[in-house]
Image: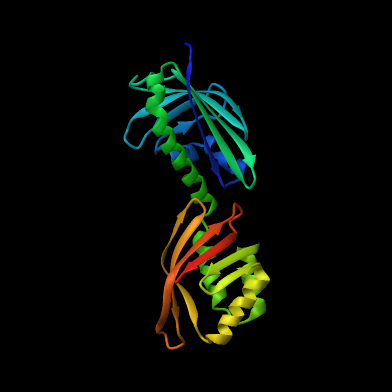
Amino acid sequence: MELAHHLDRTITIEAPQDLVFQYFKTNERWAAWWGPGSTIEPRSGGRVYIRHPNGIEAGGEVLEVVPPERIVFSYGFASGDPMPIGASRVSIHLEGVGRGTRVLLHHDFAEATVRDHHVQGWRYQLSVFANVVLDQLHADATRSVDAWFSAWSETDADTRTRALAEIGAPDVRMRDRFSAVEGIEDLTQHIGAAHKFMPGLRMEKCGEVRHCQGMVLVDWIAKAPDGQQRAAGKNVFVLREDGRIESVTGFW
């Protein structure tokens, strides 16, 4: 069968290439971005089975696998609509780029109308893929955020510096109405000045951490020594691929 029509899509996931490739290697991780019950045998000739969350079944056969760079498999639908199993070919290539991974999708089809049917599907599916990978990579986001606010309440400079160094990049940046600082040393001194001019004030996380693709949104409150709330706001954290905090922007 001639596959004369194709669809290309490229995204970048801020995660190591080896980790991204893991989602083609095990049933658990394959199902995490396709749907519960989906399975894959990551070898030439291995079975590909996809059960979409709406119950639609698809599948094919692994044609090529080159860890951690490439996987190629045939693809179609169990119902035969809009194409039968094995009637198209999917190639996914991974390239390390900067601190992340570029994902290059190439999907070959026999018919243009079927290709057009898959444009939004792949836009959605690769978005799910990116979120699943980064949710795993940043599974400790809440711990890092808690440690950040704990450091802001720490009055001992050496203890504060060590705490920030454990969770922050060496050149971590902090921006808000009262902050334009960069680096662990500058930040720990800035926090020390806050303790000097606002003694006893404590920063506390308020509510759940919300994470999406390496960005974290957190509500906070500031309490005076008597326990009364003195301020409130939101922080936006940007996390690096190693889980460390790259920058924080605060909104009062």
The structure residue drawn at horizontal position 63% and vertical position 75%, both measured from the top left corner, is 188
Left or right? Give the position of 125 relative to 183: left
The structure residue drawn at horizontal position 43% and vertical position 25%, both measured from the top left corner, is 59
- Kindly tell me whether residue 245 is visible in this rendering: yes
The spot of residue 17 in percent (x, y) is 61, 41
| Position above or below: 236 against 15 | below
The spot of residue 113 in percent (x, y) is 37, 20
Count of marks placed on residues: 0
Residue toward you, 218 or 186: 186
The structure residue drawn at horizontal position 53% and vertical position 58%, both measured from the top left corner, is 140
The structure residue drawn at horizontal position 45% and vertical position 78%, both measured from the top left corner, is 222
Left or right? Give the position of 195 relative to 161: left
| Position above or below: 188 against 91 | below
Specify the quadrant of the image occupied by residue 247. bottom right
Residue toward you, 68 or 105: 105
- Kindly tell me whether residue 160 is visible in this rendering: no
Q: Which coloring applies here?
A: rainbow
Q: Split into 4 quadrants, where in the image is the C terminus?
A: bottom left
Left or right? Give the position of 27 relative to 172: left
| Position above or below: 194 against 252 | below
| Position above or below: 178 against 240 | below
